[in-house]
Each structure stands twice: as structure tokens, then as C-alpha cells.
Amino acid sequence: MYSEKVMDHFQNPRNMGEIEDASGVGTVGNAKCGDIMRIYLDIDEEQVIRDVKFKTFGCGAAVATSSMATELVKGRHIKEAMQITNKAVAEALDGLPPVKMHCSLLAEEAIHAALWDYAQKHEITIEGLEKPKSDIHEGEEAEEEAY
Ligand code: FES
């Protein structure tokens, strides 16, 4: 059911933990499954993500997607990080079962929420970034219909 990469990131999650005095912190949840994900970003003056950590209270796919999402945004400029969609995260994991696609959406939304927090603190606007939803379940149906 799961690819080897999903199993690897689930069993050996990268960048798990938290960052003290993070530049931005984002927490999102899905009321339907009850899973919660928190992302911490350390962003330098050049707007490059120097470090990223996550804490996920959720299913195995949520852990694996958080882990992969942190790997994908680490070292990237915030504008590049904005381009990383949940589909990119799922693809980097060699796919997810359709019923687990919402777990990857949680990872995308958690990164956006952390970027939003950073933007608020620095009073800047990040192109394409919208105020995060606290419950991603609302946007989920539309996303799942695409599959
Ligand atoms: Fe909800 Fe995975 S089952 S995040």
C-alpha cells in the first residue's frame, strides 16, 4: 500500500523536533481525522529557510509527508518554498494512496501557515500566500476531486 520512501520517512523521520525562537511557526489540523501538524521555520535575512523542524500528531502518512516536506523546503528561498505543493510532496514519496492525499495537504498547509506567521512578524507580503485555514478539512473535498 505504501511506497518504500513513505515507509522510510515514517520510520526515520527527518527534521523532527522544534526550533526555539523560530522565525515562523504554523499549526494546522484536520478535524475529520483529528491529525495535527506543526512546522517551525528558521529564515535568514536573505529569506532563505536555513532550518526547519516539524511535530506531527497524526497518521503514518502525515509523519512521512511532514518529513519529506521539510526536506524539500530546507535551504530554499521562501518564494521557492511557496511552489512546493502537496502533490510535489506526494510525488517525492513515490505516491500516496488516494485516501491519504489529505495527509500531504496538511504538510503543504502547515508550511504555508509557518510562512504566514513569518510574514506577519516581519510585516511583509509573500506572493500567493493566503491566510491559513486552521482546519484543512474545509478545502479537502475540492482537492480530492482532482484525483
Ligand atoms: Fe489525517 Fe493522515 S489520516 S493526516
Image (tube, helix red, strand yellow):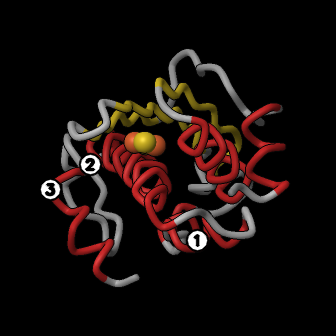
Q: Position of residue 28 (x, y in %)?
A: 32, 38
Mark 1 vs mark 2, CA separation in Å: 19 Å
**Dividing the image into 4 quarters, which one contains the N terminus?**
bottom right
The residue under label 2 is 123
Q: Is residue 7 left or right of residue 131?
A: right
Res. 119 mark? none
Q: Position of residue 41 (x, y in %)?
A: 55, 38
Identified at 21% across, 51% down, the residue is: 137
Q: What's the amino acid at mark 2?
A: Glu
Q: What's the amino acid at mark 3?
A: Glu
The residue under label 3 is 138
Mark 3 vs mark 2, CA separation in Å: 27 Å
Closer to the N terminus: mark 1 or mark 2?
1
Identified at 56% across, 63% down, the residue is: 97
Q: Residues within 10 Å of mark 3 (few under 14, many from 20)?
A: few
Q: Is residue 13 left or right of residue 110?
A: right
Q: Residues within 10 Å of mark 2 (few under 14, many from 20)?
A: few
